[in-house]
């Protein structure tokens, strides 16, 4: 049975908070912290505990933290370091610092034809392009300089079959194409592979990139060209060989209605621009078919 | 670079594949589903078993689908969140009913003896002691009923100073028994007013209990040891420490800022902050938690602890801080997010703030699903979410060279855009200077005042003089802030009232804001057109909201507000002119210092101004002060301070009371012209709307300066052929005089004079006017016995339909050329 207590009795019982608790709390507050820290430290550094935590329990099979709180996107090149996520982040910034160091984005084109990187003194047209007949020149822009890093990426993509790279590379190239050619383009096409090579590799890297670019720029992507004879990979030849070997390799595909390209402005997509012979040959056959304007975009130059 | 492609073998296996099947922020999706589910259940069918069955079904189906096709996980999570959320809400709805209602009936007032346990921190506010009690037993007459734990709100009136002193001893978890009068909380009695019944319903409280005196409260057991009791005492101790080191002007403010004791903050200051849109600084918000956690963490690290140990210590301190500051939704949200961030430090993992926020949303809604309707809850989650995803991309779009500045501006912009619809939906008020005030004051208060005053508080325990010195520094800063707020408040053109938007508008606004954000901050390739279009959409929507008070205004609207015992009529014309006739008022009783409440009920501030804001009214064109009694002018001071008034029409008596003098001074200072009219004056307010004044005659006044009822301003308003007689407090003499001097037409609507007193509204007055409807503005259970039964009989005899603000709440009359429509807030 509880005894009723009137409020007046309580007045006498009233003690200040400090009176009440000082004996109990105050001397201990100073001692509490070190004791507590000591205990926490023991828990933290206990070697036995360490061993236990390293053993895999059922709960450790799944990494719950990464399931519940998924990490930021990984760098799409090396897949290790986290990079800022979100659709507002430009694809160039979704590369980790280490990878970015190995790539040199082409900020301003040194040559207004081939789009090679500016190296200080060059303005206007580079000597390589100057040698080419003006009517055969093709205006090209590239995302990065063809350095060792870029070479590795291209190899990974092309020869080691990492198809998923087509998405970031393509988006990057789309940004480049949009900033240089703007809305001039009405059709996207790509450098074809010979059917033999296609069955060997399983995919045409230029086609994958063109699909991504077309989707990003909201432009139709058409397979316009075919390769009439199998050439050895360009990378096995010297410069002069390349220029010669390429002549008249590309024809307009038979399935294509020539009216589709008449007076169109066409963007040709390829992975690398070295001498530009391939692209020029493509452009030549497209121009013959009636395209009003041909330009090209590649990942590396 | 390429070699790093190989995955780390020590990493645990993820159940979800990378790439296409990557699981993106599962908690965010399920919390979005949870919100949708709660809203669906709120507007739809409330059945726990249906939604629970749905949840099980969807999870099985989704798991099977994922097993088969390796996709669709996010949709599954969203739908599971939706059905579980709906089930939780339905469960809360099904169980949210009053057990007491089964005993004492669902309406009316009943005296009963209740026994139970105090479950909130008891607060003394002037002559009242307020607490929540969990009722265990209820004695109604002779029968004792056992109640399955229902919470009710208790107000005990304190009769004298001894009781007042004793009331301060009350503490949480005391068991008490007391005689109270039980009544249901009042629903909103005026359009746009705060719905107390719905608010308490969301806290699962269905009854208010009023105790007459502390003598009646019998304490069964006291002084229970409990963490919460300790925290209450600690809070009290910290509070009195603040009182010691701060001057009285700032002590209340600092108590509100540091300890979450919002009730200590000066009401005027709170209103000023609220107008400027920086009221979040006054209560403990997520910002405070963030600032304090950051300070504590870095201090601990400075003392030589490792990051992990510092994080562990701060995590352990967080729950205590939450309890200490009263566990409001924003604090819980911030504490959970801060705790998870510190856990991330502890485990050496990454932080994912959006998912952290989603988790705290899930926890809080699982705890109390009704919170989703509270403005504080909505604001804290919306603003935080928008800041997390919005600030960085916008900051990088801004042109200034200093990134911190860009971030600050982006924070202010995002917070404004997101909080705008919530604020105008709940509070009908949004200042165009709000972003500026936030940009100016938030950094000062969050990065200087709060840390400094926390330091002052703690230092005060060690060395009081040093604490005072620091307190002086933070007072100085607050002084500066207040100079700034005063300056900003003077620009009254910027503090705009808004009509609460429709849900459709809110939806469109959210879409436009998202579109705006994507087009400006998104990584679009050709953003030009979208930027223009989205900006245009956004501006249009804001303009629609800004002009909303003019939309669909083909009717005149006359609102007889329920201001208790008193008169207040708001007349809005089709063209948007506003005529305010009187402003209600609470009678003034002299009070001893201990009796004074922090924010005493004031009609103008609580009823008239909120109604004007709700209607989106920005200025008063004509203010008619019928006469100078407190129940007609008491609320007008708040109106005059908040809104510009163009013209005042009043009777010719010199101001009789202090209240009236102050009112007229305030009006005059703001440049309002004050007129008295001679009888017979008449003009057209706007096409179709005319008014004619009959009384008083400045040369032949009937009343005296003290008793001016008989010199009330009396006028006839005609709105498209409808005639409305406004009478003020005129009595028999004035009625006879008007009848003898004017040939009055019959009227459609009569505002019954003097709250239905027997000294007015005589039979011959009614026979001439023959009103079809009569409105009596009168307080519930008023001490004068208004309205008089005789008056009601006379009105009945003439065949007038009587509407009373004490029974019907506010009466709104909408007049169109085709006809008249009357709406009341309550159905008696």
Image: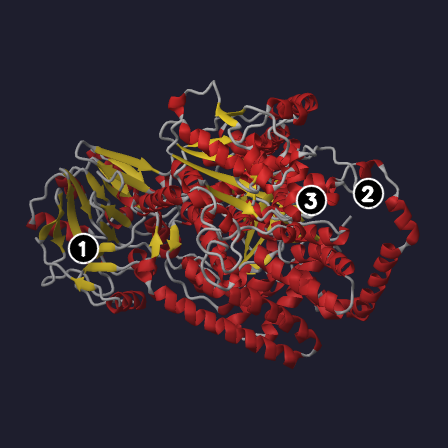
Q: Is residue B369 visible?
A: no
Q: Identify residue for label 3.
A: A78
**How would you rate the neighbour count of disc 1 (Cα within 10 Å): few for under 14, some for 14-19, many for 20 or more?**
many
Query: Would you place residue B1 above or below residue A27 in this image?
Result: above
Q: Identify residue for label 1.
A: B713
**Is label 1 on the same chain as label 2?**
yes
Q: Which residue extends farthest top? A: A255
**How would you rate the neighbour count of disc 2 (Cα within 10 Å): few for under 14, some for 14-19, many for 20 or more?**
few
Residue B278 or residue A132, whichever sits in front:
A132
Q: Identify residue for label 2.
A: B10
Residue B506 or residue B173, whichever sits in front:
B506
Q: Position of residue B166 (x, y in %)?
A: 62, 63
Chain bearing mark 2: B
Q: Nearer the viewer, mark 1 or mark 3?
A: 3
**B641 sits to left or right of B674:** right
Circle 2 — which element? Answer: loop
What separation in Å lies between label 2 and label 3 (alpha carbons)?
Answer: 18 Å
């Amino acid at each position: 049975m509880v005894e009723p207590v009137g409020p007046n009795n309580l007045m006498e019982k009233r003690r200040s908070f400090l009176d009440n608790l000082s004996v109990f709390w105050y001397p201990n507050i100073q001692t509490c912290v070190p004791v507590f820290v000591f205990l926490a430290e023991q828990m933290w550094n206990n070697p036995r505990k360490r061993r236990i935590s390293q053993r895999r329990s059922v709960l450790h099979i799944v990494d719950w933290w990464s399931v519940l709180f998924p990490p930021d996107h990984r760098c799409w090149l090396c897949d290790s370091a986290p990079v800022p996520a979100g659709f507002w982040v430009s694809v160039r910034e979704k590369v980790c610092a280490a990878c970015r160091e190995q790539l040199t984005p082409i900020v301003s084109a040194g040559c207004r034809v081939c789009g090679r990187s500016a190296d200080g003194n060059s303005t206007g047209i580079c000597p390589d392009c100057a040698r080419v007949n003006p009517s055969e020149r093709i205006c090209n822009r590239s995302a990065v300089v063809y350095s060792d890093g870029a070479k590795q990426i291209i190899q990974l993509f092309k020869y080691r079959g990492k198809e998923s790279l087509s998405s970031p590379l393509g988006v990057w190239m789309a940004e480049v194409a949009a900033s240089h050619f703007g809305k001039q383009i009405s059709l996207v096409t790509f450098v074809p592979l010979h059917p033999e090579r296609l069955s060997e590799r399983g995919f045409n890297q230029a086609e994958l990139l063109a699909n991504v670019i077309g989707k990003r720029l909201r432009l139709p992507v058409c397979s316009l060209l075919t390769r009439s004879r199998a050439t050895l990979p360009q990378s096995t030849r010297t410069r002069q060989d390349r220029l010669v070997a390429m002549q008249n390799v590309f024809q307009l595909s038979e399935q294509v209605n020539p009216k589709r390209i008449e007076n169109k402005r066409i963007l040709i997509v390829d992975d690398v621009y070295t001498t530009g012979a391939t692209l020029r040959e493509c452009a030549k056959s497209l121009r013959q078919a009636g395209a009003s304007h041909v330009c090209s975009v590649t990942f590396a130059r | 670079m390429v070699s790093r492609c190989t995955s780390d073998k020590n990493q645990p296996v993820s159940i979800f594949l990378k790439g296409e099947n990557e699981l993106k922020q599962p908690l965010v999706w399920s919390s979005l589903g949870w919100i949708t589910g709660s809203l669906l259940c709120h507007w739809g069918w409330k059945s726990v078993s249906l939604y629970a069955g749905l949840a099980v079904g969807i999870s099985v189906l989704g798991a099977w689908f994922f097993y088969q096709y390796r996709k669709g996980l996010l949709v599954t999570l969203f739908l599971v969140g939706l059905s579980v959320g709906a089930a939780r809400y339905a469960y809360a709805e099904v169980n949210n009913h009053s057990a007491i209602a089964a005993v004492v009936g669902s309406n009316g007032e009943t005296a009963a003896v209740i026994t139970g346990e105090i479950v909130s921190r008891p607060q003394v506010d002037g002559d009242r002691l307020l607490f929540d009690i969990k009722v265990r037993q209820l004695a109604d007459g002779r029968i004792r009923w056992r109640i399955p734990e229902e919470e009710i709100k208790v107000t005990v009136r304190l009769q004298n100073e001894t009781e007042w002193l004793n009331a301060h001893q009350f503490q949480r978890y005391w068991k008490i028994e007391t005689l109270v009068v039980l009544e249901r909380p009042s629903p909103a009695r005026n359009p746009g007013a705060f719905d107390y019944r719905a608010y308490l319903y969301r806290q699962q409280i269905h009854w208010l209990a009023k105790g007459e005196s502390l003598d009646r409260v019998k304490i069964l057991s006291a002084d229970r040891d409990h963490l919460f009791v300790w925290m209450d005492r600690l809070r009290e101790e910290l509070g009195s420490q603040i009182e010691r080191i701060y001057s009285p002007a700032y002590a209340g403010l600092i108590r509100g800022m540091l300890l979450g004791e919002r009730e200590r903050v000066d009401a005027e200051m709170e209103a000023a902050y609220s107008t400027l849109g920086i009221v979040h600084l006054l209560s403990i918000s997520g910002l405070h938690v963030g600032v304090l956690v950051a300070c504590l963490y870095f201090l601990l690290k400075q003392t030589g602890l490792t990051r992990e140990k510092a994080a562990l210590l701060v995590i352990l301190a967080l729950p205590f801080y939450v309890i200490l500051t009263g566990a409001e939704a924003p604090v819980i949200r911030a504490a959970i997010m801060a705790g998870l961030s510190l856990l991330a430090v502890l485990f050496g993992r990454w932080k994912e703030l959006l998912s952290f926020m989603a988790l705290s949303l899930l926890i809080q809604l699982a705890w109390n699903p009704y919170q989703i309707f509270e403005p504080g809850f909505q604001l804290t989650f919306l603003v935080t979410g928008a800041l997390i995803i919005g600030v960085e991309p916008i900051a990088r779009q801004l042109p200034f060279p200093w990134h911190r500045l860009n971030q600050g501006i982006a924070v202010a912009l995002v917070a404004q855009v997101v909080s705008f619809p919530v604020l105008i939906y709940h509070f009908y008020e949004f200042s165009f200077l709000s972003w500026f005030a936030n940009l100016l004051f938030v950094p000062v208060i969050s990065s200087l005042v709060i840390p400094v005053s926390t330091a002052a508080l703690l230092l005060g325990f060690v060395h009081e003089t040093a604490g005072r010195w620091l307190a002086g520094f933070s007072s100085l800063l607050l002084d500066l802030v207040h100079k700034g707020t005063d300056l900003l408040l003077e620009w009254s053109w910027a503090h705009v009232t808004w009509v609460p938007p429709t849900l459709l508008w809110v939806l469109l606004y959210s879409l436009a804001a998202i579109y705006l954000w994507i087009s400006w901050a998104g990584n679009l390739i050709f953003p030009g057109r979208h930027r223009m279009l989205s900006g245009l959409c956004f501006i249009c929507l804001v303009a629609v909201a800004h002009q909303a008070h003019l939309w669909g205004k083909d009717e005149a609207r006359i609102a007889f507000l329920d201001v208790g015992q008193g008169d207040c009529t708001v007349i809005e014309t089709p063209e948007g002119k506003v005529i305010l006739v009187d402003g209600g008022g609470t009678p003034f009783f002299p009070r001893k210092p201990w009796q004074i409440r922090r924010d005493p009920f004031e009609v103008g501030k609580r009823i008239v101004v909120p109604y004007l804001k709700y209607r989106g009214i920005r200025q008063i064109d004509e203010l008619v002060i019928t006469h100078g009694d407190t129940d007609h002018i008491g609320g007008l001071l708040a109106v005059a301070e908040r809104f510009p008034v163009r013209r005042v029409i009043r009777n010719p008596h010199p101001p009789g009371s202090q209240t009236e003098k102050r009112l007229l001074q305030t009006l005059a200072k703001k440049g309002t012209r004050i007129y008295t009219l001679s009888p017979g004056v008449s003009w057209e307010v706007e096409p179709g709307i005319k008014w004619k004044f009959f009384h008083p005659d400045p040369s032949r006044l009937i009343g005296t300066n003290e008793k001016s009822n008989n010199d009330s301003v009396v006028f006839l308003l005609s709105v498209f052929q409808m005639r409305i007689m406004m009478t003020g407090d005129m009595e028999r003499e004035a009625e006879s005089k008007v009848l003898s001097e004017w040939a009055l037409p019959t009227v459609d609507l009569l505002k019954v004079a003097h709250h239905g007193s027997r000294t007015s509204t005589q039979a011959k007055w009614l026979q001439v006017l023959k009103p079809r409807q009569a409105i009596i503005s009168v307080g519930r259970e008023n001490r004068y016995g208004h309205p008089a039964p005789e008056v009601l009989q006379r009105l009945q005899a003439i065949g007038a339909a009587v509407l009373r603000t004490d029974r019907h709440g506010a009466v709104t009359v909408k007049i169109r050329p085709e006809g008249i429509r009357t709406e009341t807030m309550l159905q008696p």
